[in-house]
Image: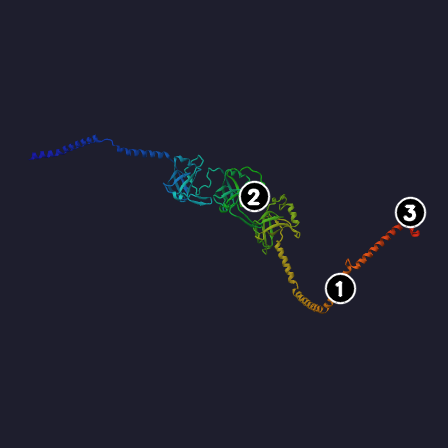
Amino acid sequence: MSENTTSNENSDLNKPDHDMKQVSNQNLHDVKIKKEKWKPSLIWLIPIVALLIAVSLAIKAFLNVGPTINVSFRSAEGLVAGKTTVQFRQVNIGLVRKIKLSDDLSHVIVEIELTRDASNFASNDSKFWVVRPRIGTSGVSGIDTLLSGSYIEVEGGKSAEKQTTFTGLEFPPVVASDIPGKEFFLKAHDLGSLDIGSPIYYRRINVGQVTSYKLSNDGQNVELQVFIQSPYDKFVTTNARFWQASGIDVSLNASGFNLQTESLASIVAGGIAFGYPEHSKQAPAARNRSNFTLWDSQAEALKNPDGQAYPIVMYFDQSLRGLSIGAPIDFMGIDIGEVTSINAEFSHNHTQMRMRVEAIIYPSRIADGSELKPTGRIFKSFIEHGLRAQMRTGSLLTGQNYIAFDKFQKATNGSLKVLSTGAVEIPTMPPELSNLQSQVSAIADKLSKFPLEEIGGDVRKTLNSINKAVNSTDQLIKQFDGKVAPEMQLTLDEARKTLRSAESILLSDSPMQQDIRRAVQQMTRAASSVQLMADYIEQHPESLIRGKKPEAKNAKQN
């Protein structure tokens, strides 16, 4: 039993090893059978071709990838990462990959991946801006983005220097960089109604636009950048003058009412005009980016240079209502200056007040005006001979006044005074209205002293006397009509008869007229005979003694 049992156990122990060998041999046999059965299949071509296409696209994309740049904007309005494109003349040259906030949260940074062909747009003078629907003075733009969405437009620079960080423009540039022309800088006191895109006129023709503006570093002026297109840029010479032609220029001053405008477009959007002073000499064309002054009006821009200014001071004891800063100073009808300050000044321990007017005058506005400076000999002579400053009304419509320098025969002795500030005090005369008021007041005082009541009583008595005389005259007329008038009628009838008789006598065919003619004829003959006798006696005075010789008898004998 024991032996059989032991042998059975040994056989059982050896059986697994035998089975393992059989299984191993079976697997090896199966593998050999499978290796013998595997053959290449055409279906494997599809993933292989797809893999090759993917690799080629990756290589192409890698080769076409250009530089990556960062552009900062104030906001990311309308921009979407992975969707918003970058375009140049409607051609895609890049894509927005990422949008993030700046560290100080003041702006956004847009990461743009440019194409390899657009690597030149990474130059340091390139400009980027977001194209959105805009309505401004320069027109309407970006309407197509209402359907397609906003995109970033780029304007390539010409510099060879590269950079990767840019500051985007909030507004698109008004003038493209490839348009020929020149840029100029203008300095003005304020912007007025000007804006980016406001037109620039030369002889009422639009030749350019305002491209940008900013405050000066000291904050006292506004600096504008303008662009004049070619070929009009050649008309901007070194002596050119620029002035604001914005809207409607209406002025009410001592000279009256003045209205000026450049064009309908300038009324709506503002504008700038330029020209030259009258009779100015021809000057060379101004260089690109030259600086000019932008004047407030055409009159100020085109006037001749004023030369040196001399400060003067005038004191008035009357109200200066109607006189304003900028009012002209008139010298014998010529504008030689303007009022710069009007103030009140106390004197004599604040017991009296007088009005102080400060002004500047330009003697150069008058021919040979150098001799008319306030401290000059001729001006002093004028003051000594009655030249005075007087406030006058310039326009009844506006009520504006001005200061006139004129000679007054009744002016009291006066002289010039040089103040500690360097200004010259000019003696003054009261305004014409003040003189008129004083004259009216004097007349009123005389009228108040006039005995009007007594004169009125005397007038009443005189009127009563006249009334009585008129009544007496009426009575006399009535008596005349009753008694004297009939007798006068008879007298007139007799006179008519007498005139008729005289008329009948004086007629040409009346007997008396015929008798008178005969008498006149006889008298004429008698006068002729007397004349003949007088002539004969003058020739033969001896005939008075001897008598007339018988001339006819002697003639027969001979």
Residue 109's tag is none
Amino acid type indicated by mark 1: Lys
Does label 1 or label 3 sit earlier along the sequence? Answer: 1
To which residue does mark 3 refer?
A: 556
Where is residue 294 shown, x and y percent of the image? Answer: 53, 43
Question: Circle 1 is placed at which residue position?
Answer: 497
Q: Secondary structure at mark 3?
A: helix
Which secondary structure, mark 2? helix
**CB atoms at circles 1 and 3 under 8 Å apart?**
no
Mark 1, mark 3: which one is toward the viewer? Answer: 3
Relative to the observer, which residue lies in front, 393 or 248?
A: 248
Q: Nearer the viewer, mark 2 or mark 3?
A: 3
Percent of width and height locating residue 316: 60, 53
Quarter-of-image position of residue 443: bottom right
Do labels 2 and 3 touch, CB within 8 Å? no
| Residue 421, position as x, y percentages in the image | 59, 48
In the rendered image, the quadrant that contains the N terminus is top left
Check whether the beta carbons of the residues at disc 2 and disc 1 lie within 8 A of each other: no
Q: What kind of residue is marked 2?
A: Leu
Disc 2 marks which residue? Answer: 302
The answer to whether any part of residue 4 appears in the image is yes
Would residue 386 be found to the left or right of residue 171 on screen? right
x and y, in percent, of residue 474 in the image: 69, 68
The answer to which quarter of the image holds residue 127 is: top left
Q: Is residue 421 visible?
A: no
* Separation of marks 2 and 3 at Cα, in angstroms: 120 Å
Q: How is the image coloured?
A: rainbow
Q: Kindly report the distance in space between the C-alpha atoms of the residues bearing marks 1 and 3.
A: 66 Å
| Quadrant occupied by the C terminus | top right
Local packing at callout 1 (Cα closer than 10 Å; few below 14, some 14-19, many 20+) is: few
Element under disc 1:
helix
Residue type at mark 3 is Lys
